[in-house]
Image (tube, rainbow, N blue to C red):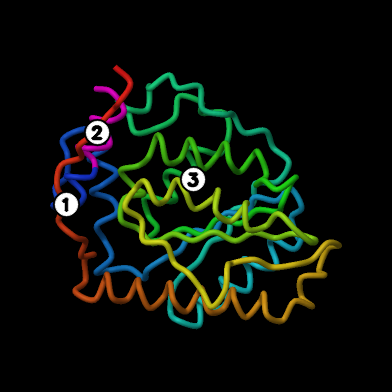
Amino acid sequence: MDRREFIKKSAMATAAGVVMASPIGSVLAQEDHTATRKMKVLLINGSPRKAGNTFLALTEAAHQLEKNGIDTEIIQIGTQAIHGCVACNHCSQTGRCVFDDDMCNTVIDKMAQSDAIIVGSPTYYGQPNGTVLNLVQRLCYAASHVMQNKPASAVAVCRRGGASAVYQTMLMPFQMLNMPVVTSQYWNIVYGRTEGEAALDAEGLQTMRTMADNMAFLLKKIHAGGNPQYPQREPHQATSFIK
């Protein structure tokens, strides 16, 4: 099964509430427990600085989600190495990445038990941290079956400029997986250079809280009947003009 076929079948199964008879199906079965557990948002801190401004911004959002009755977990990328995707397509058969010596498969497991995701990154030369890009690309490639339909958002942190490009870049994978993008009163950008300086960005922190309120509102609407209700979708149709 190639990647396009895998994504198509995963999306159809998720939309119809069908559990596939495969290793991927077992993960889908695990996540259908929203009627008996609190909703949860997974937040990924793409900064190597454990207590830096990206962590501060994500923590502001997490606290606001908790006020709305939503559980949260922040995962720290830190300074560990994370592989880039090598397009081996092993994951199309297993739903897991072939590299099992970094945090990617752990994040896949956590995402299977979460109802939404927020990814934060500092701005490096107008781009997200390369390490968090590696993780998100592999997560979306290997685990589209646990990403489909779940609300998603991104947070960019910078000293001065380039954050809008970081924000847009991090949202693009989610837009390919039918994931509702959660917005705020402004682009999800927080300003600060030295550790803790983002606490002075009153508007940026308010933007984080508003994003969290919007995400909580959307999650409660999706899960209003107990189990999540997603749109019915057509089978995926891929068109390539390179023949």
Magenta stretch holds residue 177 = no
Please report whichever mark, 2 or 1, sits nearer to the chain's N-terminal start: 1
Residue annotated with mark 3: 107
Tell me which segment is drawn in magenta.
1-10
- Please name which of the two marks, 2 or 3, marks the residue nearer to the observer: 2
Q: Residue at x 66, y 68 (%)?
A: 57
Please report whichever mark, 3 or 1, sits nearer to the chain's N-terminal start: 3
Q: Residue at x 70, y 51 (%)?
A: 47
- Please name which of the two marks, 3 or 1, marks the residue nearer to the observer: 1
* Kind of residue sitting beneath label 3: Val
104 on left or right of 59? left
Residue annotated with mark 2: 238
- Please name which of the two marks, 2 or 1, marks the residue nearer to the observer: 2
Residue annotated with mark 1: 233
Give the x, y percent position of residue 187.
57, 68
195 on left or right of 242? right
Give the x, y percent position of residue 64.
54, 79
* Kind of residue sitting beneath label 1: Arg
77 w.r.t. 3: above or below: below
Q: Are marks 2 and 3 in contact (CB under 8 Å)?
A: no
User: 46 or 100: which is nearer to us?
Assistant: 46
Give the x, y percent position of residue 48.
73, 48
Q: Quadrant of residue 220?
A: bottom left
Q: Are marks 2 and 1 in contact (CB under 8 Å)?
A: no
Please tell me whether the stretch drawn in magenta is mainly helix, strand or loop. Answer: helix
| C-alpha separation, residue under disc 3 versus residue under disc 1 | 27 Å
Q: Using a 10 Å C-alpha cutoff, classify the residue at mark 2 as few (fewer than 14 neighbours), some (14 to 19) or many (20 or more).
A: few
Q: Quadrant of the N terminus?
A: top left
Q: Secondary structure at mark 1?
A: loop
* Kind of residue sitting beneath label 2: Ala
* Identity of the residue furthest to the right in this view: 194
Q: Quadrant of residue 60?
A: bottom right
